[in-house]
Structures are given as structure tokens and as C-alpha cells.
């Protein structure tokens, strides 16, 4: 493939609308690893103002919010705009409720609680055929984003959740070094990361891989083997 999915994401502007600060912070932190241009708002009213000003390509929004809820915001947007990709976050899964979301012409919905897999998978599905769904690491390894699985010579390599996230992060930073600080912020999130824990993590991951594609850069971090 000519383009990689992560490179394609960098070309899009995304708006995240969520009133719960902790959830929004985690969503935005994750989105910033895939998108260079990430906007955020804590309610539908501010979200709509940001939409008018910046015209994002993608909107990810909660439903129950103060001032103006997500449904009201989407109704305002869809009056004249049917092209912006809209993904709704919801804790409800009843058929009647989801039908209401479909009638709003949204592109996808993600059920709470949200994980990095469901977030990325929802974004991928909302794009449809606009983007590639494989990230080629080298001639033998590739990551299937839709399945959230690593393949080696067309065979799945079974990995743990954090290991998959680490490899995706390496791919995102394939032209640079993934620093220890970036690894701690993205993978350990609210927990502190010791160097011994990181070394153990890398050692176990390497043992799961048929060949070593992870290169250590002393005192800085890691990168994908070129």
C-alpha cells in the first residue's frame, strides 16, 4: 500500500466533545498519538462553536452533556452538513436508542466504557473505504487495525493489549525514536513506569515475536528496526 493508516490520520482534524474531564483527558491523550490536530470541548454548545470555527473532519461526542447535549449538537450540524464524520459515545445499547442515533445520520457509535481498541476500531469503521486498514511494519509483519491483531507471514501473533499498543506507537513514530517519556505517558498512563518494568515488558514482547523488530536506543527509548 502507498499510504499507511497512521500517516492518513495526520491529515485529519478531530474534535472530541465530552463533559467528564477524566474521560475527555484520556480520549484526547489517545487521539493525539494518531492525529496531529485534536480539538476538545466539555459540552455541546462549545463543541458546536468549535465546529463552526474549525470545521473538523471528524467529531467524537458524548450524548448526555450540560448546556447542549450531543444529540442537539449533531442536529444543528446535520442541518447543512452531511459529510463530517460523527461518532457518538453511548452507554446504551437498546435497539430503539441506537435507531435514534442512526436517524441522526451518524457514522458510528461506540459503547461505553471506551477502550483504546474500541476507539480506534470505531474511527476505522467510520471511515469505511477511505483509509487502508493495514499497517505494514516490514515485508513480513503487518498490523491489521480493524482486527487489532499483529500478523507475521499471514499468521496471527497473539499479543497482550499493552504489547499491541506499544507496537502501534512504534509504527506511529517509525521515522523517529519513541522516548521513555512517551511510552510512560501512553502505556502506563496514570501509573509510574520503572525502567525495570519496561525492560521486562520489552523482553517478554521480543520473546513472543518470530524475529526482533524492536531496536533499543540507549538512554533514549526504542524504534522499529529499519
Image (spheres, rainbow, N blue to C red):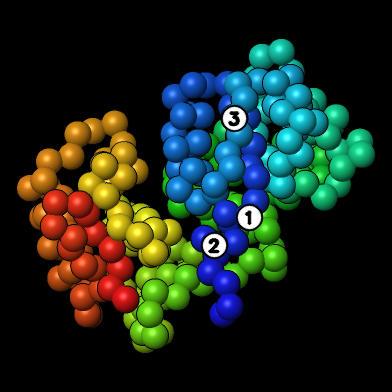
Could you say which quadrant of the image residue 43 lies in?
Answer: top right
Drawn side of residue 4 relative to residue 213, left or right:
right
Drawn side of residue 130 relative to residue 223, left or right:
right
Say which element carries label 1. loop
Return the disc, 3 or 1, that comes first in the chain's sequence. 1
Label of residue 63 in the image: none
Seen at 22% across and 80% down, the residue is 210
Whether the residues at callouts 1 and 2 have beta carbons within 8 Å, the answer is: yes
Mark 3 to mark 1: distance in Å? 17 Å
Whether the residues at callouts 3 and 2 have beta carbons within 8 Å, the answer is: no
Picture coordinates of residue 120, whole percent (x, y): 52, 52
Seen at 82% across and 40% down, the residue is 104
Up/down of 91 relative to 98, above or below:
above
Up/down of 26 relative to 13, above or below:
above
Q: Which residue is mark 1?
A: 11
Up/down of 130 relative to 55, above or below:
below
**Where's the C terminus, which quadrant?**
bottom left
Between marks 3 and 1 in the image, the one whose residue lies nearer the viewer: 1
Q: Which residue is mark 3?
A: 40
Say which element carries label 3. strand
Q: Outermost residue, top direction?
A: 67
Whether the residues at callouts 3 and 1 have beta carbons within 8 Å, the answer is: no
Q: Which residue is mark 2?
A: 7
Picture coordinates of residue 35, whole percent (x, y): 54, 48
Seen at 43% across and 70% down, the residue is 143
Return the disc, 3 or 2, that comes first in the chain's sequence. 2
Amino acid at each position: 500500500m502507498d499510504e499507511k493508516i497512521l500517516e492518513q490520520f495526520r491529515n485529519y482534524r478531530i474534535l472530541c466533545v465530552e463533559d467528564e474531564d477524566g474521560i475527555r483527558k484520556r480520549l484526547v491523550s489517545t487521539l493525539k498519538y494518531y492525529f496531529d490536530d485534536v480539538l476538545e470541548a466539555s459540552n455541546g454548545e462549545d463543541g458546536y462553536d468549535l465546529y463552526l470555527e474549525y470545521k473538523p473532519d471528524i467529531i467524537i461526542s458524548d450524548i448526555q452533556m450540560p448546556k447542549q447535549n450531543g444529540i442537539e449538537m449533531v442536529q444543528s450540524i446535520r442541518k447543512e452538513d452531511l459529510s463530517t464524520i460523527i461518532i457518538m459515545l453511548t452507554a446504551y445499547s437498546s435497539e430503539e436508542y441506537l435507531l435514534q442515533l442512526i436517524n441522526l445520520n451518524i457514522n458510528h457509535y461506540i459503547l461505553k466504557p471506551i477502550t483504546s481498541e474500541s476507539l480506534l476500531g470505531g474511527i476505522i469503521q467510520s471511515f469505511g473505504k477511505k483509509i487502508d486498514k493495514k499497517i505494514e511494519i516490514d515485508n513480513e509483519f503487518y498490523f491489521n487495525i480493524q482486527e487489532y491483531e499483529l500478523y507475521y507471514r499471514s499468521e496471527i501473533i497473539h499479543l497482550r493489549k499493552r504489547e499491541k499498543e506499544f507496537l502501534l506507537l512504534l509504527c506511529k513514530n517509525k521515522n523517529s525514536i519513541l522516548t521513555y517519556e512517551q511510552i510512560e505517558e501512553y502505556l502506563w498512563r496514570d501509573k509510574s513506569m520503572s525502567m525495570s518494568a519496561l525492560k521486562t515488558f520489552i523482553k517478554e514482547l521480543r520473546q513472543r515475536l518470530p524475529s526482533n523488530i524492536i531496536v533499543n536506543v540507549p538512554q533514549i527509548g526504542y524504534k522499529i528496526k529499519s
